[in-house]
Image (cartoon, grey):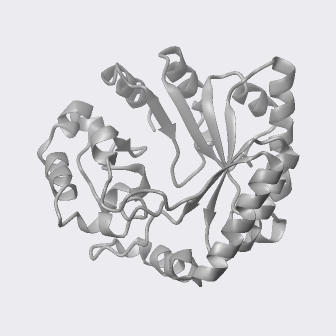
Amino acid sequence: MDWAFYARLLDELASLEGLRLEGTGEPMCHPRFFDAVALAARREIAVTVSTGLAACGTRELERLASCGVSRLEVQLDGATRETYEALRAPRRFSRVLRNLVQLRRIKERLGAVRPTVVLALTTVRENLAELAALVRLARRLGVARVAVRNVPHDFSESRLPKAYAAARDWTGAQSVSTEDPDRVRRHVSRALEASRECGVELRLPGRGVAGRCRQPWDGLAVSWRGRAMPCGLIAVPERAPLGDAAVDGVFHVWNGLAFGEFRDALASPAPPDVCRGCALYKGRF
């Protein structure tokens, strides 16, 4: 994202309370990542960063412990090297674990409370059996929280861009929504038991209410080019374009016809096509 546009966004959103930096890439690779966090933190905006934590060295970890990030969600989709590296690229399982330990030690040395570190796992068939092991790994790493979520979307909308057909196929093959329910319950039960034994907080998916989504009323997702989306789970604006905040400004987009029509449809018995395959909308996220 262009720096001038980012700074303008924060200026336009003077009452912004929370900011989430994430995307299909690695936010920490942006050349002004730490400047972006510091600018938001100076305005008392709570900054959450979703990261693979593989692109960090000691210098970046030092800055991460002091730049103003409130919450750091480290995407760790497996408790073993084999599973993690089958699901994540680049394949740097050992490096991610070392960085987690080093970040904890840096925070201890600095007496820093933040960022709060969370291990985040998107559960699929391939890693379902490692839920309990991930909780135990979190304890060994000194991480107090594990957040498990289902695959955000099944990409089932009728107008899915062709570029995402492979994502739809992969999701259909890996989603635990079509897994044997007894197997799912067995591994979830083991994870809960591990959570109690280890004293690690465990957030599990599927506790929402189907058909109740507040995302387009509570927040705005903006791509690196400034294109607006109803929420971050859609990931790319091509799936539900709602305007260009870089050209027209945030408030024009937020109060515009496209956003209004999207909200009206989401509140109706016939939600937008893109929402019907969403795990959050289904209460399963």
Residue at the image point whose x is 81% and y is 58% from the top: 93
Q: Is residue 274 left or right of residue 130?
A: left
Residue 81 image point, x, y percent: 83, 65
Residue 15 image point, x, y percent: 35, 20
Residue at the image point whose x is 48% and y is 23% from the top: 45
Q: Is residue 154 left or right of residue 171?
A: left
Q: Is residue 149 left or right of residue 269?
A: right
Position above or below: 224 against 205: above
Picture quadrant where residue 69 is located: top right
Picture quadrant where residue 73 is located: top right
Q: Nearer the viewer, residue 51 or 172?
A: 172
Picture quadrant where residue 38 is located: top right
Residue at the image point whose x is 34% and y is 47% from the top: 215
Position above or below: 242 against 183: above
Residue 192 image point, x, y percent: 71, 59
Position above or below: 172 against 118: below
Q: How many labels sit on residues?
A: 0
Q: Is residue 283 left or right of residue 63?
A: left
Q: Is residue 76 visible?
A: yes
